Image (tube, rainbow, N blue to C red):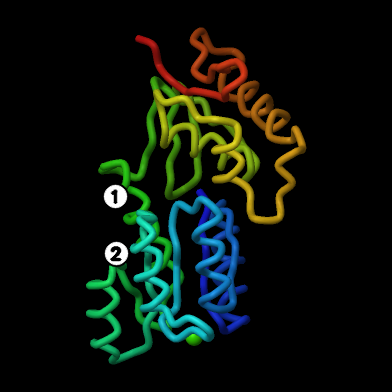
């Protein structure tokens, strides 16, 4: 899942980016509101984390602009202590949640999981397709009780497919949600990764779960 972090304090921004990447998220950062707006408009994010006090375009204006453009991405805002006005205005302007700085990283991760879950009415922290189970919290993947060991990138790909189970996911869409802004979309590396994921998930099992839709993309489904 791909997250945009809009935060002008470089240290905080890179701390959040690094922490989220360790949790297998793909992260882009913007250091001011204008860059944040540009990325929010041009890229596809699963979640945006934004500070309220931002240069060039402040967080509240940024929120309103994103919602005005009907970008329905979940937004978590970061506020400073005791700023009730910011929190209320933020929530009224289309933010989904807020977190007061300084915050515990564990809490940020838990709130992110909740916000990402809201989109698909998922009630647990596990994704399931047939006998394949992906645990969003521990990042463990298993099939029929056999553990499947994936690299972070393979995990991201499988997670995105499973969140969209029974739907065809185009190659482009997959790239947009598992790679950051600097990825060259012309490369065929995604196919290489997909093949690795398939080998690990489907080889040695009776039923194939990941299917190629020729010329379009991929689908994960359990036919029975
Ligand atoms: Ca700030």
Distance CA(mark 2)–CA(mark 1): 10 Å
The structure residue drawn at horizontal position 75% and vertical position 32%, both measured from the top left corner, is 188
Residue occupying the far front of the picture: 69
Quadrant containing the C terminus in the rendered view:
top left
The structure residue drawn at horizontal position 62% and vertical position 28%, both measured from the top left corner, is 197
| Label 1 crowd (10 A; few <14 / some 14-19 / many >=20) | few
- Numbered label tally: 2
Residue 118: numbered disc: 1
Residue 150: numbered disc: none
At numbered mark 2, what does the secondary structure look like: helix, strand or loop? Answer: loop
Residue 40 lies, in percent from the top left, at: 50, 61
Whether residue 67 sits left or right of residue 133 in the image: it is left
Residue 184 lies, in percent from the top left, at: 74, 46
Residue 157 lies, in percent from the top left, at: 57, 37
Task: Compare residues 217 and 104 and report the one nearer the observer.
Answer: 217
At numbered mark 1, what does the secondary structure look like: helix, strand or loop? Answer: helix
Q: Earlier in the sequence, mark 2 or mark 1?
A: 2
Disc 2 and disc 1 in contact, CB within 8 angstroms: yes
Residue 96: numbered disc: 2
The structure residue drawn at horizontal position 35% and vertical position 56%, both measured from the top left corner, is 70
Say above or below: 26 vs 48.
above
């Amino acid at each position: 899942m791909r997250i945009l972090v809009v935060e002008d304090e470089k240290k905080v921004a890179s701390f959040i980016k690094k922490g989220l990447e360790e949790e297998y998220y793909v992260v882009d950062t913007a250091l001011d509101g204008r860059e944040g707006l540009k990325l929010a408009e041009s890229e596809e994010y699963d979640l945006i984390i934004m500070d309220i006090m931002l240069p060039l375009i402040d967080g509240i204006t940024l929120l309103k602009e994103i919602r005005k453009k009907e970008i329905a991405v979940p937004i978590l805002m970061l506020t400073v202590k005791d700023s009730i006005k910011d929190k209320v205005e933020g929530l009224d302007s289309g933010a989904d949640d807020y977190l007061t700085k300084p915050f515990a990283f564990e809490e940020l991760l838990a709130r992110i999981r909740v916000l990402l879950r809201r989109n698909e009415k998922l009630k647990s922290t596990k994704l399931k397709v047939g006998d394949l189970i992906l645990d969003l919290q521990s990042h463990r993947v298993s099939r029929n009780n056999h553990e499947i060991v994936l690299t972070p990138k393979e995990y991201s790909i499988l997670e995105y497919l499973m969140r969209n189970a029974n739907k065809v996911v185009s190659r482009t869409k997959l790239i947009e949600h598992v790679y950051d802004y600097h990825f060259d979309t012309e490369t065929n590396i995604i196919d290489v990764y997909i093949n690795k994921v398939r080998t690990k998930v489907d080889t040695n099992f009776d039923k194939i779960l990941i299917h190629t839709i020729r010329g379009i993309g991929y689908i994960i489904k359990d036919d029975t």
